[in-house]
Image (cartoon, helix red, strand yellow):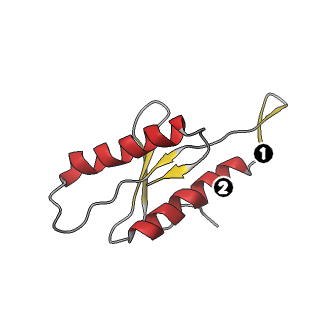
Amino acid sequence: SSVVRADEVLARYGGEEFAVVLAEVAAADALAAGERVRRAVAGHPFAFEGEAYSATVSVGVGVALPDDGCGTDGLIERADRNLYAAKQGGRNRVVG
C-alpha cells in the first residue's frame, strides 16, 4: 500500500523538500498524513552500495481554510514555517 493516497498529490518542491497536497482535509487529518509519511520513512531500511542507512523526515503542515484568504503563497509559507519549527524542535517530527 502507498503512503500517499490516490487522491493526494506528491511533488518535489526543492532540493530535499517535497510537498503533498491534500484537498478538503481537516487539519487533524493533514497532520495524520504527515505522520504516516514520517513513520514510513523512519521505518524503511535504506541501502546504497551494500551499506545500510536510516533516514528521518521533518514535516511542516500548512492548512488553508475556505475563507481565510491565505492563497497558495500563504499556504506554502505556513507549511514552511512549520517545517522550520519541526527541524528546530529536533527533526523527525510533524508540526502543524
- Which of discs 2 and 1 lies nearer the camera? The answer is 2
The quadrant in which the N terminus is found is bottom right
**Residue beneath the point at 18% across and 62% down:** 68
The residue under label 1 is 45
Whether residue 30 is situated above or below residue 74 in the rendered picture: below
* Observer able to see residue 7: no
Query: How far from the left and from the top, in percent, is residue 25?
Result: 38, 71
Whether residue 95 is situated above or below residue 24 in the rendered picture: above
Query: How far from the left and from the top, in percent, is residue 28?
Result: 45, 69
Mark 2 residue type? Arg
Disc 2 to disc 1, how far (Cα)? 12 Å
Identify the mark at residue 77; answer none if there is no mark: none
Query: How far from the left and from the top, in percent, is residue 46?
Result: 75, 40
**Residue beneath the point at 65% across and 41% down:** 56
Q: Quadrant of residue 23?
A: bottom left
The numbered mark, 2 or 1, whose residue comes first in the sequence reads: 2
Mark 1 residue type? Pro
Whether residue 24 is situated above or below residue 77 in the rendered picture: below
Q: Quadrant of residue 89?
A: top right
| Residue occupying the far front of the picture | 89
Q: Locate residue 53 relative to residue 87 in the image: left or right.
A: right
Disc 2 crowd rating (10 Å Cα; few below 14, some 14-19, many 20+) is: some
The residue under label 2 is 39
Whether residue 2 is situated above or below residue 15 in the rendered picture: below
* Observer able to see residue 50: yes
**Residue beneath the point at 74% across and 49% down:** 44
| Residue occupying the far right of the picture | 50
Q: Nearer the viewer, residue 46 or 73?
A: 73
Q: Locate residue 74 relative to residue 32 in the image: left or right.
A: left
Query: How far from the left and from the top, in percent, is residue 69?
Result: 14, 58
